[in-house]
Amino acid sequence: MDSLVIAGKEFSSRLIVGTGKYKDGPETRDAIAASGAEMVTVAVRRVNLDRSSESLLDYIDPAKYFLLPNTAGCYTADEAIRAARLGREVGLSDWVKIEVIGDLPTLYPDVQATLEATRVLVKEGFTVLPYTSDDIVFAKRLIDAGAAAVMPLGAPIGTGLGITDSYALRMLRELITEVPLIVDAGLGTASDAALAMEMGFDGVLLNTAIAGAKDPVLMASAMGLGVRAGREAYLAGRMPRRLYATASSPLDGISK
Amino acid sequence: MDSLVIAGKEFSSRLIVGTGKYKDGPETRDAIAASGAEMVTVAVRRVNLDRSSESLLDYIDPAKYFLLPNTAGCYTADEAIRAARLGREVGLSDWVKIEVIGDLPTLYPDVQATLEATRVLVKEGFTVLPYTSDDIVFAKRLIDAGAAAVMPLGAPIGTGLGITDSYALRMLRELITEVPLIVDAGLGTASDAALAMEMGFDGVLLNTAIAGAKDPVLMASAMGLGVRAGREAYLAGRMPRRLYATASSPLDGISK
Amino acid sequence: MDSLVIAGKEFSSRLIVGTGKYKDGPETRDAIAASGAEMVTVAVRRVNLDRSSESLLDYIDPAKYFLLPNTAGCYTADEAIRAARLGREVGLSDWVKIEVIGDLPTLYPDVQATLEATRVLVKEGFTVLPYTSDDIVFAKRLIDAGAAAVMPLGAPIGTGLGITDSYALRMLRELITEVPLIVDAGLGTASDAALAMEMGFDGVLLNTAIAGAKDPVLMASAMGLGVRAGREAYLAGRMPRRLYATASSPLDGISK
Amino acid sequence: MDSLVIAGKEFSSRLIVGTGKYKDGPETRDAIAASGAEMVTVAVRRVNLDRSSESLLDYIDPAKYFLLPNTAGCYTADEAIRAARLGREVGLSDWVKIEVIGDLPTLYPDVQATLEATRVLVKEGFTVLPYTSDDIVFAKRLIDAGAAAVMPLGAPIGTGLGITDSYALRMLRELITEVPLIVDAGLGTASDAALAMEMGFDGVLLNTAIAGAKDPVLMASAMGLGVRAGREAYLAGRMPRRLYATASSPLDGISK
């Protein structure tokens, strides 16, 4: 079976979905169900940890989904480290998606702080999935630091631009094979997700593209199909591109 | 239900598949089944009409699929007209996909001959689906001539390049609403099919992209998923694109 | 010397400029001068032929520029033919740029009418430069009809989109070598013009991109430089593209 | 006059050229002359500092060109700092282009080490021009550290891919206005240089695209023209893009 394996754990779906920006709990629940995702990421800061009032967790059954705590809303390595520890203490998980925002207007990641937090948390026994830029130097350092996967952006969070630098992502994919590579952030629609999978990425993590669609539940379904479509196309091995049907040589090397 | 309607007939799938270039009959049959397509196009010239020996039709059950005869291999309007008539005479169908090749090395369509054949065949009662270029003048003339759908190329036949002129196709989609618009030819992988559907096209017709993949049956499944993903994403209404998350205005008008 | 040769006549500049849409005569004159163009195209319909009042020709010295009458504003082959004849009768030229509009909202060319007009006018001894789409079948027919050059659009007139289908234009360039190929219409800025020349086109024809800029005279100069830059880069032979500096094989075949 | 100003110094050309990878000294000299550049960057490690044998400086007249020492070949902040100091000690300059390679196969910059070296060298009175990625977080930190300009890559060194992430570079340009932004590395041909200037960048730094062309001297001329073309087009204010000529609203926000 073609499953996604991270840190020895198998996931039936290669789509990971977030839980932010939905209208309400029921919409969150229905979109997640429609997406077919098995792994769902939740911001530690947004979980109502004492469960005194309505919580995200009222709508996401931990028996059904694998919860991946994330450090959304953190601006320093220390904040991210504390959020990860808190998530573990309250019993959420010893897995964590590290996300450190480095720039307010753009929400671009602070890759240096992300690397620092990864180093500390790996030593503390966490399974760390860092959200990062498409910088190959940092991607390799994250792996050296013990990251269980590397999650480069397709485009900055919340932009919906798709993969804006297909060369950079293709280079990452070609040179990094030690851990799963998951495109995290920036995708906007189903063909973006399919394309990411066709490029050979191991998975896709999405949030705004679903929650920000006019019909989030239908878009969640579209994304689930898109990821499967792209993965199958990747495994099927696409036809070569040619400038015209009878051209003697294929157009190798075209990245998009 | 979101069905494709052409000339009053409903189709459950928006993917139409061809039958050329497969290794053998069983592969053809399995790929078609995996694609989920309901309409299947067959070259009149390639159907062994007297059924004296093995025929394509041994592998495509007309009770299960809607057969669309096509005029592949024709180089003039007359040849295409004769092929259409022959297809009707032997009981294949009074529907026909007109395809007239105008240029040998590139297999680019001869849109003038296509228009002539369309005019003649519509008058003879055929339901005509012409394969054409992305030329909006001819697209409109085909509609005036009574075409039941217009099928512009994404790229020339057999190239696998995807939609090479997203502006031209977007213009067609914006200005033509009288009949279904189906992207025919040139697509190479599942994300291409998803993208075509996200642009608002009513369907996609594919052949080489499936038959020319390393694993045609798996690629057929990928294409079926891709078309559904793209259609759902179109109906769901994608999020707006922004240069960065907090940018005050969306990047309207980006076509890809 | 690297000159553009059409129908045996040499031109020092590979940039051809139009005369429409300028604010007034002096701006037209100054922009043309700044562009460095030697060939200037004027609409027969817009030349005040009896010279009773101010005319375009008051600002474009026929001793300095090679005037190329065009059939802008014509919607049928007959209108274009009549305009060409009128241009010759009043002594403008026996060269003509054929332009037949086939679709009002888009100004897309009617390639069939263009071909008809070309056939008639070539027989009447005109040197015919037809403006056409990127349809290779019609491009070849125009050559068969005796066109002295073929002028495919980069994008529809007045859009400023640049070359929207680099594959189609690359295919034209690869397969057509009998006559000069000139990108006519759709370009928007200097890098578009440079790119067209780098793709190996013999020249570029521009109008709206200059007249529609905020500072037309400065944009005219930019376009002149862009055409020269692109031509020199083409002749110089660009470096191969690589995914990264030490990649063992170049990324052949990338068209943009 | 439209000059490039860095750290209070005016440069007549917005093109900065490197001196690596040429066949020999005369070719280096001729290409630099043909480019029209005023600022020329030389690797401190490659200058034969005791002038005992032939040196780059035999071919680049410091009276004519502004020499910008660079730290090419350095892999750590310390190496870059030492190279900068050496360049000043031997009288080359107290300006320095910081370049720290972080990844061997890709030559991708180590932005963290670049930032460290920038901090140290600015405090020592250097005018520091750091070569960096398109990471906006680091770009802002380099400015905070006192960089006199920021020089993001268009694509990794030596690839010739052009600007691979036009969104990231457009975001940098929109949000960074305190210091000049110069596209450094990755460009391949004249239209790439023109495009960078049209996007509003203050300058372009090139090396392989010139030295790696078949005819480096002609390509140098092409690049000089391309930069001027792009700059003039930027200042002239391009026409708006439209899907078709009579479309009621322009296609705002398209980045390429």
Image (cartoon, coloured by chain):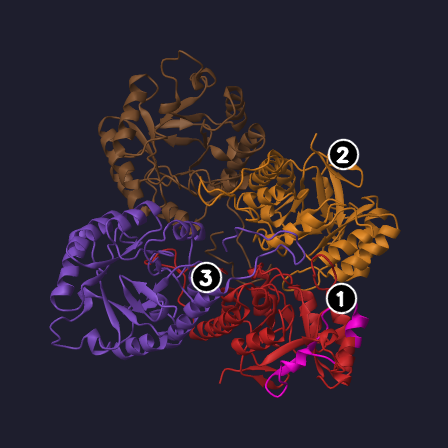
Chain colours: A red, B purple, C brown, D orange
Residue D216 vs residue C218, the one in the foreground = C218
* Chain that bears disc 3: B
Q: Nearer the viewer, mark 1 or mark 2?
A: 1
Q: Residues within 10 Å of mark 3 (few under 14, many from 20)?
A: many
Q: Nearer the viewer, mark 1 or mark 3?
A: 3
Start and end of the magenta stretch? A53-82
Q: Amino acid at mark 2?
A: Ala
Q: Are marks 2 and 3 in contact (CB under 8 Å)?
A: no
Q: Is residue A55 left or right of residue A29?
A: right
Q: Residue furthest front?
A: A53
Q: Nearer the viewer, mark 2 or mark 3?
A: 3
Q: Report which residue position mark 1 lands on.
A: A112
Quarter of image, res D224: top right
Q: Are marks 1 and 3 in contact (CB under 8 Å)?
A: no
Measured as percent of width and height from the top left, residue C168 is found at 39, 49
Label 1 element class: helix
Figure check: B226 above or below D135: below
Q: Report which residue position mark 3 lands on.
A: B198
Q: Amino acid at mark 1?
A: Gln
Question: Which residue is found at the position 58% from the left and 42% from the top?
Answer: D194
Residue B98 seen in render: no
Measured as percent of width and height from the top left, residue B23 is found at 29, 74
